[in-house]
Amino acid sequence: MSDSHAEVQPPAKKRRAANFSEEELMILIEEVAERKAVLLGPLTSVVTNKGKELAWKAVAEVINSVGVVQRNVSDIKKKWFKVKSEVKCKAAKEKIERSKTGGGVAEPTVWKPTEEAMLTLIESEAIEGFSSLESGTVNPDRPQPSTSAVYRQPTGTLVTPVEHISPQPQSNEPQPSTSSKL
C-alpha cells in the first residue's frame, strides 16, 4: 500500500546546451552555402521535404564531427535562422545609419567573420529592400515583369490590356476638367 502513495518526482529540467563556437558557426554557414539550393530553395519535383531533411542531417553530421556538443537537426536549423535574422537586422541598422542626414560620418559597423560569411549568402533584397523599384533603376541581370500582361475575364476569355480598353468617343467639345481650382 505504501507503493501507491510514492512521491511523484517532477520532470528534470532540460539542461541548456553550450553555445555554438565560432568554428561551428563558420562550418554551419559553409555547409549551408554548399547545399543552398536544397536547404533554402523552394520545394520542386527535384527538391523535396525528404531531400531537405537529408541535407540538414548531413550538415548536422559535419558540425557534430567538429564540435564538442552533439547537436540535433532542430537545434542547428534554429541556430541558422537565428543568426540569419540577427545579421539581417544588423545590416538593416547599418543601412539606416548610412542614410541619416547630418551628424557627420556614420560609425562603422564591426562584423565578425561568421557575420560576413552570412552576408554573402543573404540576397541583397533581404537587406536593401526593393530599392530599384523606388529609385526607378533597373538591374539588367534580373528578369523584369512583363508589361503586356494577359488576364482572364470572368467569361473565361483571355484579354490583353490593349483589347480591354474601350475607345473613348471623339468629340470636338472640350472635356470638363476634373481638377479642382483653389
Image (spheres, helix red, strand yellow):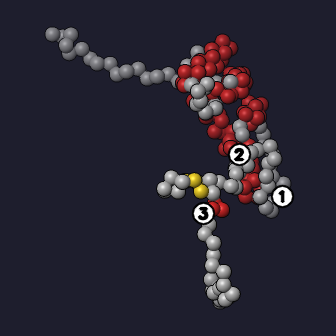
Q: Secondary structure at mark 1?
A: loop
Q: Position of residue 36 (x, y in %)?
A: 68, 28
Q: Secondary structure at mark 2?
A: helix
The amino acid beneath tag 1 is Gly
**Nearest-to-viewer mark from 3 and 2:** 3
Q: Residues within 10 Å of mark 2 (few under 14, many from 20)?
A: few
The amino acid beneath tag 2 is Glu
Q: Residue at x 57, y 25 (%)?
A: 48
Residue under label 1, please give it: 104
**For the image shown, how many numbered marks are present on the structure?**
3
Above or below, 48 relative to 112? above
| Residue 77, quarter of picture | top right
- Residue 125 marker: 2
- Residue 113 marker: none
- Distance Cα–Cα, label 3 vs label 2: 34 Å
Q: Nearer the viewer, residue 110 or 47?
A: 47
Q: Earlier in the sequence, mark 3 or mark 1?
A: 1
Q: Position of residue 1 (x, y in %)?
A: 15, 10
Above or below, 38 relative to 182? above
Q: Earlier in the sequence, mark 3 or mark 2?
A: 2
